[in-house]
Image (tube, grey):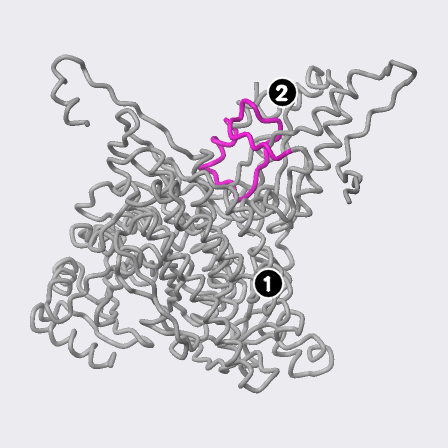
Amino acid sequence: MSTIQKSKIEIAKAPEGIEGPGFFATQVDKVVGMARANSLWPLPFATSCCGIEFMATMASTYDLSRFGSERLSFSPRQADLLMVMGTISKKMAPVLRQVYEQMAEPKWVLSMGACASSGGVFDTYSVLQGIDRIIPVDVYIPGCPPRPEQVLDGIMQIQELAKSESIRRRDTEEYKNMLAKYNIE
Amino acid sequence: MSNTLLDTVNDKLKAKFGDGVLSAEMHYDFPVFTIRKDIIHDVIKFLKEDEELAFGFLTTMCGLHYPDNKGHELGVMYQLHNLPKNLRIRLKTFFSISDPHIPTVTDLYPTANWMERQEYDFFGIIFKGHPNLKRILNMDEMTYHPMRKEYPVEDGTREDKDDKMFGR
Amino acid sequence: MSKEKNNNTDIIEKEYTTLNLGPTHPATHGIFQNVLKMDGEIILEGESTVGYIHRAFEKIAERRPYYQITVLTDRLNYCSSPINNMGWHMTVEKLLKIEVPKRVQYLRVIIMELSRIADHIICNSVIGVDTGAMTGFLYIFQQRESIYDIFEELCGARLTTNIGRIGGLERDFSPKAWALIDKFLKEFPDKLKEFENLLMRNRIFMDRTVNCGPISAEKALGYGFTGPNLRAAGVDYDVRVMNPYSSYEEFEFTVPVGTQGDTYDRFMVRQEEMWQSVSIIKQAIEKVKKEPAGVYHADVPEFFLPPKEEVYNNMEALIYHFKIVMGETDVPAGEVYHCVEGGNGELGYYLISDGGRAPYRMHIRRPCFIYYQAYTDMIKGTYLSDAILTMSSMNVIAGELDA
């Protein structure tokens, strides 16, 4: 009595293109974007409370691996997505910056929680008032700490960014100027 | 029970150190003694080594700052605990901000090492004889001791906060 | 082994490696930096640097009204924030001489023991992960999610709970919360047993953890250890027994102690404490049933925020609401120390009040900060992989360490 169940796994949708018998034509940008978006390797830069919620996001109930991001890359060299979670103090700031600089292009930054985004309740002499003072940020997640659903939503926003990004974007003047504003080579 | 502890310790300290004990009183459930600065190390050593009292556990210590208390602006609070008998006492000592030197107790309690570094970092209290007295929580480049009352808590670089109506 | 090598020093000049473990190292859970001097894979000496998330709690506390400091205490040991919240409330209640009704005390015990379980789940499952057993983590973390569900029902937040108020709780347990607690108590023992079966007598796990990072009782006391780490070394010091608060003296529970003070003992002590917590919660539920229903705070209108309906319809409530929020209530001057048994040991609040709206000085005895200084001593002469395990079994929480 074996019944074949339909698999619940969804395969990422092919980008728009011209399809015919035996061929499929589309833009390189879109194919690369799709591949990037569905295999983001996050570097968890977890410092405090948000890190524990990230653990919950990784664990069985919320399961980040559904988004192709279960492979945590602790080495900045192989990471695509820098997830900054928790308070960044002024003592930690140079370390964070160095980690960002070590990452290879293309790279995205996700700022999780109030502390990383703006300093949060800790408006004190020792806390960096938002990581966007030292590195550019793509997506902010509000909350103290944000719920795992919010983290998943943030990851999905990053995926959208990755999908729609043209492969040449990182070579543009605009991008270089943006990095120059942060004094990043 | 605590009242008798206050009396016992007070009697012992008075017998040994005389007028070095400046005050002895109860604060809620804690006997609190104020000790003159120059004998604080001897007092703690005595309390640790006394057979009856045997305060062998340093629960915590922290710095204090009373800017209006001229000549005795800075202080240190020690909290000792006798684990087997469950006796707890608190010692305090005050000294001038211009001469913030006080003997270390790291030779009696190894745990005082980081606590003293923290208080040095926060208040600039210099613990004489400490093996490695440098900043612990803040950056080494920091030029002031932030927990002193005159320094603000805020970062100072925030521009998005408007305090005209409510203040902090 | 090193001795044999030392005999050859005249032939080959010996070189040591300096290894920078942290501040962002995958194996350290949190941001700790240890600069280690290594002889091959053996650690000769190390130096810890802390303060990477120093947030100046004690300074902020001098500028905030009492009820706003609860928010800060959440972020101390964020694995068990309700215990920190309760500790702070009890400290202020001690200062104000507020007697809290028995029912509230029992409700608080339920909350505190739930969060102790949540804390120990993280620590023990992470010990598992560091020995290479990810399965245990994935299994037991679901139970942590059900504790989160309970907290969410009680106060609306999962992790940083801000639960309770000075003088009681902000609201009574809802019927749904009771149902969730019942469900948790039914499910948890089986799951915990399963987790234990995975690790406790596991050959690989025992080989890795037995005799890894041991500390003797004398040394532990000297370094100011408290909590599970001290009990693993064989000293039965527990604040819940020594200085009972919140009616802990009425509960029956055993304080587990270890003998070696090594990683395995620390794991076992935490494991047993979870069983004891389950039993305490069950007792507390029985006790709550005997108390008059519906009481969830002490009768102290000048410190306890009135419900919103009262504020809008009642003159007195409105005045009290205004006074509390603007910080114009009279607080007695004095100094008080209160400690609770946190997830990691004796969590103490030392509070000096000069009668103002904010404390004059607040000092937190943070157990992590005090016992972490023994770390470099404990890992001397061990392998690097054991050092990682020692750290995770000590349950060093960065938020509590750096304050």
Q: Is C129 a magenta residue?
A: no
Residue B99 visible in the snapshot: no
- Which chain hosts label 1? C
**Distance in Å between CA atoms under marks 1 and 2:** 41 Å
Q: Which residue is denoted by mark 1 in the rendering?
A: C151
**At which x and y percent is residue A170?**
68, 18
Q: Position of residue C271 (x, y in %)?
A: 42, 57
Q: Residue furthest left?
A: B16
Q: Is residue B37 visible?
A: yes
Q: Are marks 1 and 2 on the same chain?
A: no
Q: Position of residue C311 (x, y in %)?
A: 69, 77
Residue lying at 45% horizontally and 33% vertically, measured from the top left:
C25
Q: Quadrant of residue A133?
A: top right
Q: Is residue C358 above or below residue A22?
A: below
Q: Nearer the viewer, residue B112 or C270?
A: C270
Please determine whether, in this image, residue C89 is positioned above or below residue C261: below
Residue at the image position 14 percent from the left and 12 percent from the top: C11
Is residue A88 magenta-colored? yes
Identify the secondary structure beneath mark 2: loop
Q: Residues within 10 Å of mark 1 (few under 14, many from 20)?
A: many
Three-letter amino acid code of the residue under disc 1: Phe
Q: Secondary structure at mark 1?
A: helix
Q: Quadrant of residue C276?
A: bottom left
- Which residue in the protein does label 2 denote? A105
* Quarter containing the C terminus of chain B: bottom right
Kindly identify which numbered label has been placed on residue C58: none
| Vertical arrangement, residue C284 with respect to residue B42, above or below | below
For image coordinates 59% across by 58% down, the residue present is C148
- Part of the protein shown in magenta: A69-98
Chain for disc number 2: A
Number of disc labels: 2
Alpha-carbon neighbours of circle 2 within 10 Å: few (<14), some, or many (≥20)? Answer: few
